[in-house]
Amino acid sequence: MAEIGAEIRIQANTAAYWRVLVALFLAGFVTFASLYSAQPLLPVYGREFDVPPATASLALSFATAGLAICLLPGAALADAWGRKRAMAFSLLAAAALSLACAAVGDFAPLLALRALQGAVLAGLPANAMAYLGDEIEPRSAGLAMGVYVSGTTVGGMSGRIFTSLVAGAGGWREALAALGAVCLVCGAAFWLLLPPPRTAGHGAPRPAMRLFGPALHHLRDGRLRALYAAAFLLMGTFVPLYNYLGFELLTPAYGIPPAAVGWVFLLYLIGTFSATWMGRQADRRGQRPMLRLSVGLMAGGLLVTAPVSLAAKLTGVALATFGFFGAHAICSTWVARHAASHRGQASSLYLLFYYLGASAGGYAGGLAWSLAGWPALIALLLAFLALAGTATLALPAGEGGATPAATIGSLPES
């Protein structure tokens, strides 16, 4: 252990440190496996409940909206209740809600449970990074943060693929029940592994103005508003691209088996590389030009998907994925670096707009796809990107230099 003032923090290569790494990996896995498990099931929900694609997409939109709305209250709850307890509750409740979703008989209660699942999951991203900042000795925090983010990436991708494969073999209810069981085990392991808080300050409620006052201050900052708008529009472009790719690939023009559609989420691995690479390029060449390049790559990828060709669809989506994760890395890091104080609040606001964009864009994309198919969807998403590009006009040129820890810590999974 390392003593800092009157506080004792966890150092690297101790038993407690490795317990933290495993626990936070499991936490990231459960959070994003639960949140995004619905995405490959959207066509299945459409058939099962006889609803149009835009309505089916609400199974994801309600969850991301619930998470976005509860991010700031989730941080406040942890201040009063303790971060370990708040995070463990989030994981176990989300797993139980996956099991409940598997038993519903109608679409309306499924949506209600998904909204509640997103709300309880807000207690994890709101507090995991703060826990690491409080409990881990600063020189050892980078690896711990990287492991947590790796868990979010692995969870988001494998949760999508897992539910798609199990649904193809046995049904969507069996897929959600199996995922819920896995997440319950992971949530219990998290509770057993994560060391109790060692630093001072846990358990004291935070006044409401300390919670919302800084948020209002950040919203008055023009640069942060531009970054929040970009987050909303970029996520509002990216989520519907994958939402309705599944619907498109199941049409007779492609004839892809439902169980195979989930494998398209392997393209997310491209984002793991691009987020790091584009972040480094932004440090060297400036944030704004690399952000604009990322938005341009997304637009180019959308245009490549226009032909009725599986190769074109996958190539274009891969290019758009590369651009999105690059843009997300740059925007989230810029928020953390620009905020002169209350950086946690600034990043929470970024996540709020980010997930609201997922909810709004997911539904709007479904309306476009139902209206005129893939061309209408691409036209709408290009319009979103044009607005995102306009938002970058409010950002100064030539900035860079984010620290590695800030870059890693500001990368929630999508």
Image (cartoon, rainbow, N blue to C red):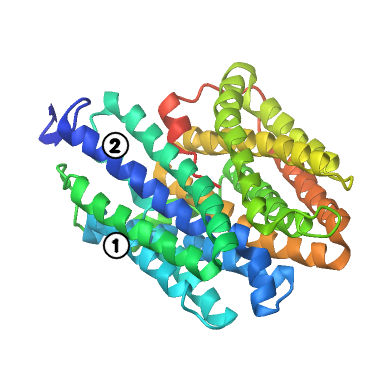
Query: Percent x, y for residue 139?
Result: 28, 23
Disc 2 target residue = 21
Residue at image coords 48%, 61%: 67
Give the x, y percent position of residue 176: 48, 65
Q: Name the side, left or right, on which 388 lies relative to 150.
A: right
Q: Residues within 10 Å of mark 2 (few under 14, many from 20)?
A: many
Q: How many labels does the image show?
A: 2
Inspect the image, locate mark 1, and give the three-letter code of the amino acid beneath it. Answer: Phe
Q: Residue at x 19, y 51 (%)?
A: 192
Residue type for callout 2:
Leu
Q: Name the residue under label 1.
A: 89
Look at the picture and state if 341 lies above or below 102.
above
Q: Position of residue 256 (x, y in %)?
A: 74, 53
Residue 140, image x, y percentages: 28, 26
Mark sitting earlier along the chain (2/1) = 2
Q: Nearer the viewer, residue 245 or 406?
A: 245
Image quadrant of residue 277? Answer: top right
